[in-house]
């Protein structure tokens, strides 16, 4: 290819440039880049802003020549090209060049569109997000052997060398919709198991979970361990913190293993249970435990800090805890969390 480029360059420098563009994208695809990396490389090659937009998810990636991804309003695109997969237009690629288009812009966009279609076809989003629950259960079950788990993952469309994250979800929205939002450009499969939904995904965007969805995200590389972690993390979710990563819990995860009778009979947890009949007090204590500051709690509750201080003083007396002291705040946090785990 390089020898051919050398010979053709003597005839037409634009032909040489076009072949080098083709070689550039061939190299990118051999490196198995994702869509953001593809956009960054294209912006650097074209020396102007490059963008990729997927029609199905509405996701747009816009990258400046220095490699910075930005969601700033796009300037008028100087050149665009459709992304086509299976004879269906699934998105658009574009360049934002301040001046007139470069002679090679059309070639760049043509190869970018082809490369983007190849990435989407290989890594997702999958045409069918919902999966056979039996296959998903094989993947996450601790009783599955490694051969059965690997086979189930292959049947679900996951490459052997890609990590699989497990997410436990409670949602009124369809699971497939949630899956596409949190993993828009890579493989994702969803299935309901009993009262909890399962997502298997190669990447997860925590900011993509819609309002009202609770999600626990496992951290382990093994899907069966990741599933157990995801279920534990889901129990720690709250309206204020609807998405919880297991690896962010640290020592708090140990509370999930405390016997329920032991937690229920603890004096601090019992005090929380009695206080919970008053939602106002519970919200105040929750805001204070989440922020660790009366003023920040007042901001969360949209109240004057003196009102919050009076409430916390009364709550502390009811619980028999000095909430203004570090030890008292720690006791309240642990008791509130342990009570929630009883109520999940």
Image (spheres, rainbow, N blue to C red):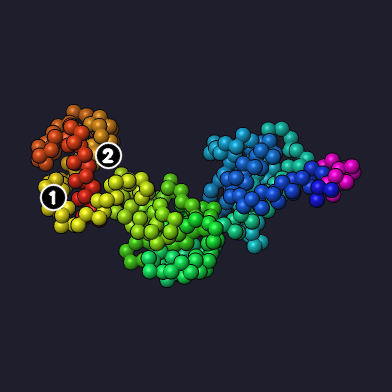
Q: Main secondary structure of the magenta part?
A: helix
Q: CA distance from mark 2 to mark 1?
A: 21 Å
Q: Nearer the viewer, residue 134 or 46?
A: 134
Numbered label attached to residue 74: none
Q: Which residue is mark 1?
A: 266
Q: At numbered mark 2, what does the secondary structure look like: helix, strand or loop?
A: helix
- Is residue 277 visible in the rendered structure shown here? no
Drawn side of residue 199 relative to residue 128, left or right: left
Q: Magenta segment range?
A: 4-15
x and y, in percent, of residue 202 in the image: 50, 55
x and y, in percent, of residue 109 in the image: 70, 46
Q: Which residue is mark 2?
A: 290
**Residue under the image location 64 percent in, 59 percent down:** 85
Q: Residue furthest right?
A: 11
Badge 1 density bin: few <14, some 14–19, many ≥20, Cα 10 Å: some
* On screen, residue 229 above or below 74: below
x and y, in percent, of residue 260 in the image: 18, 57
* On screen, residue 97 above or below 20: above
* On screen, residue 52 above or below 124: above
What is the count of numbered marks? 2
Is residue 63 inside the magenta stretch?
A: no
Say which label, 2 or 1, has the lower sequence index: 1
- Give the foreground label among 2 and 1: 1
């Amino acid at each position: 290819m390089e020898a051919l480029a050398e010979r053709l360059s003597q005839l037409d420098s634009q032909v040489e440039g076009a072949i080098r563009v083709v070689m550039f994208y061939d190299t990118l695809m051999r490196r198995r880049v994702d869509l953001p990396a593809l956009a960054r490389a294209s912006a650097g090659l074209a020396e102007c802003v490059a963008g990729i937009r997927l029609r199905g998810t509405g996701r747009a990636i816009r990258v400046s020549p220095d490699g910075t991804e930005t969601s700033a309003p796009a300037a008028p695109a100087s050149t665009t090209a459709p992304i086509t997969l299976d004879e269906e237009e699934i998105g658009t690629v574009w360049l934002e060049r301040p001046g007139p288009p470069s002679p090679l812009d059309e070639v760049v966009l043509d190869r970018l569109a082809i490369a983007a279609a190849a990435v989407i076809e290989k890594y997702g989003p999958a045409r069918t997000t919902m999966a056979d629950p039996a296959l998903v259960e094989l993947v996450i079950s601790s009783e599955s052997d490694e051969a059965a788990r690997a086979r189930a993952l292959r049947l679900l469309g996951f490459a052997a060398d890609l990590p699989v994250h497990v997410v436990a979800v409670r949602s009124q929205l369809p699971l497939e919709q949630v899956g596409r939002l949190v993993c828009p450009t890579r493989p994702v499969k969803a299935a309901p198991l009993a009262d909890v939904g399962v997502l298997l995904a190669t990447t997860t965007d925590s900011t993509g979970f819609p309002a009202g969805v609770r999600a626990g995200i496992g951290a382990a590389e093994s899907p069966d361990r990741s599933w157990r972690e995801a279920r534990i993390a889901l129990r720690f979710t709250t309206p204020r913190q609807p998405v919880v990563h297991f690896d962010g819990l640290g020592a708090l995860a140990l509370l999930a293993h405390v016997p329920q009778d032991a937690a229920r009979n603890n004096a601090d947890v019992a005090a929380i249970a009695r206080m919970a009949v008053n939602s106002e007090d519970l919200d105040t204590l929750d805001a204070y435990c989440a922020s660790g500051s009366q003023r920040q709690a007042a901001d969360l509750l949209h109240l004057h800090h003196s009102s919050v201080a009076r409430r916390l003083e009364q709550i502390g007396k009811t619980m028999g805890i000095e909430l203004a002291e570090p030890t008292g705040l720690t006791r309240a946090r642990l008791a509130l969390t342990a009570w929630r785990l009883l109520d999940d």
